């Protein structure tokens, strides 16, 4: 099985597992924006990087379950969303209908987008680039983004050796990965800057990444505060974060 077929099959299985729940409880497809924006510490600030959305053409790049597409539509964007997985597209369509928003869904491969040049003013993606061939994907992003447009991606970061050790050896809830995905690293950033010279990178979850293996508690806000303070004062610590937010401007 090829890489893309393997990726599609993996996410189709995930969607199939979720489908039974939504069949029994379709009301779970409905959600408030905060449920998406607050589910990880980087999501809200990352979506804020997209700026004003009213009336703009937005692409949800690798839409998965479709929550981001719904949030962007609620902000007034004209949203197109695509995914490689037919299973996730089915769920995303149901979620858009359940939340009474209009989203145009397309089955597509992020390395060969079926859209015309300069089709989108804004592009959003969460945990998607590290599944793809960046050399091909970056040129496609540049092609479909309008001059002056903004693309924002949140991606797992792979330059912390201790985190990489934990990723490979410690189990935790929600730990599911495809065989070919790899966290992005410095070499990926260097390449992206050849296409998007003004690329901005911001790290999230330095100490607070331990939330992945510990029970929730008041300690989370304290560690989030320490992370924000340290990362703003010592930017080089961002290389040890769990995730990075990439802001690309054409």
Image (spheres, grey):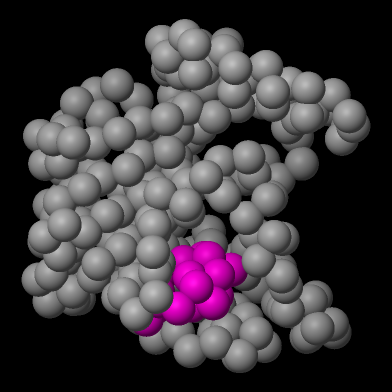
Height in image: 180 above or below 191? below
Instruction: Name the image quarter holding the N terminus.
Output: bottom left
Which is nearer the eye, 239 or 121?
121
Q: Is residue 184 visible?
A: yes
Give, as a single range, the part of the protein colored magenta: 63-83
Q: Position of residue 198 (x, y in %)?
A: 18, 36
Percent across and percent down for residue 40 are: 64, 44
Q: Please give the name of the residue rendered at 50% of the width and 73% of the height, measured from the top-left corner.
A: 75
The residue drawn where x is 29% and y is 21% is: 186
Q: Position of residue 223 (x, y in %)?
A: 73, 21
Is 65 left, or right, of 160 in this rendering? right
> In this orientation, does residue 80 appear?
no
Q: Is residue 41 above or below residue 73?
A: above
> Which quarter of the figure has residue 122?
bottom left
- At 69% from the left edge and 23% from the top edge, which residue is drawn? 225
In reply to whether residue 214 is colored magenta, the answer given is no
Query: Within the image, what quadrant is residue 70 found in?
Result: bottom right
Vertical comparison of 226 with 95: above or below: above
- As for residue 77 lying within the magenta part, the answer is yes
In the displayed structure image, the side of residue 166 where residue 129 appears, left or right: left
The percent position of residue 61, horizontal first and vertical second, equals 37, 63
Q: Is residue 210 placed above or below 32 in the rendered structure?
A: above
Residue 140's image quarter? Answer: bottom left
Q: Nearer the viewer, residue 70 or 12?
A: 70
Q: Nearer the viewer, residue 186 or 233?
A: 233
């Amino acid at each position: 099985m090829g890489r893309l077929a393997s990726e599609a099959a993996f996410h189709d299985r995930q969607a199939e597992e979720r489908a039974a729940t939504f069949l029994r409880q379709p009301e779970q497809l409905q959600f408030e924006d905060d449920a998406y924006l607050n589910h990880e510490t980087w999501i809200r600030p990352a979506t804020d990087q997209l700026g004003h959305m009213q009336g703009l053409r937005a692409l949800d790049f690798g839409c998965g379950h479709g929550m981001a597409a719904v949030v962007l539509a609620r902000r007034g964007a004209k949203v197109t969303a695509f995914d490689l997985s037919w299973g996730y597209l089915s769920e995303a369509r149901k979620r858009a209908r359940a939340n009474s928003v209009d989203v145009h869904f397309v089955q597509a491969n992020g390395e060969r987008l079926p859209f015309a040049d300069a089709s989108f003013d804004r592009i959003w993606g969460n945990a998607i680039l590290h599944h793809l061939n960046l050399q091909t994907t970056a040129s496609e992003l540049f092609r479909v983004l309008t001059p002056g447009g903004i693309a924002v991606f949140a991606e797992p970061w792979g330059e912390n050796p201790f985190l990489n050790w934990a990723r490979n050896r410690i189990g935790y809830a929600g730990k599911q990965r495809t065989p070919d995905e790899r966290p992005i690293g410095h070499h990926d950033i260097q390449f992206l800057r050849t296409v998007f010279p003004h690329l901005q990178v911001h790290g999230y979850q330095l100490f607070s990444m331990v939330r992945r293996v510990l029970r929730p508690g008041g300690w989370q806000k304290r560690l989030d505060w320490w992370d924000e303070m340290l990362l703003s004062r010592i930017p080089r610590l961002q290389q040890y974060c769990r995730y990075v937010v990439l802001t690309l401007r054409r």
